[in-house]
Image: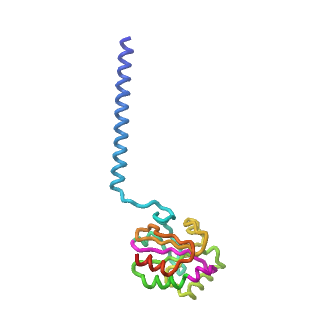
Amino acid sequence: MYAYILMRNRIKRRIAIMKRNAALIILAALAAVMIWQILWPKVPPVGIEEGKTAPDFTLPLIDGGTAKLSDLKGKKVIINFWATWCPPCKKEIPDLKTVAAANQKDLVILAVNYTVSEANERTVKKFVQDQNMKFPVLMDPEADVLSQYKVFSYPTTFFLDEKGVIQKVKRSMVSRAELEKFADS
């Protein structure tokens, strides 16, 4: 009987120690989460909605080389998804060219071509030359970025601030006034 009481007391002490240790672990975890929340910089989650960080991508440039979105942090970025066969896309080009030329220091326009819908790459190159498009034209040969950004209509334009956060999404033709307003903001 005495051995039973002794063993029962030991078990009670062990349970008390385990409860205390569990409470300490939980408190330490909560403290770590609170410190992390305070010290960690607030970065919006990645997504394609306004207020979220635009998903990063790397695509080939039409004239060689590649362009990576995250390399443009510190500048405002307009990502314009377009195709040569798209009438509203063609109408936007003069305004995109004007705004790009007027804001070269702090704004980058990336024209992402819906390459799989084109007859061939030469068609796109000729179109870009004929239109005298001086801003970066990117090719999306597998439509990976178009899928990532859920582009279903053309043109579609994403407006990103200097941190890469989406400020506006336009799923139709963008006006010169909208482009200038964003560039000046």
Residue numbers of the magenta segment:
74-91
Percent position of residue 104, x then y: 42, 82
Percent position of residue 83, x then y: 60, 78
Image-based side of 93 in relation to 34, left or right: right
Percent position of residue 14, x then y: 36, 27
Q: Quadrant of the C terminus?
A: bottom left
Image-based side of 26 in relation to 94, left or right: left
Identify the colour scheme used: rainbow
Q: How many marks?
A: 0
Residue at the (59%, 85%) spot, across then down: 127
Task: Please tell me which residue lies in front, 171 or 71.
Answer: 171
Task: Please tell me which residue lies in front, 53 or 11.
Answer: 53
Residue found at the far top of this picture: 1
Residue at the (48%, 77%) spot, across then down: 178
**Relative to 175, residue 35 above or below:** above
Residue found at the far right of this picture: 119
Task: Please tell me which residue lies in front, 35 or 124.
Answer: 35
Q: Is residue 8 magenta?
A: no
Q: Quadrant of the N terminus?
A: top left
Residue 149 lies in quadrant:
bottom right
**Relative to 35, residue 18 above or below:** above
Q: Is residue 81 magenta?
A: yes
Percent position of residue 120, x then y: 64, 79
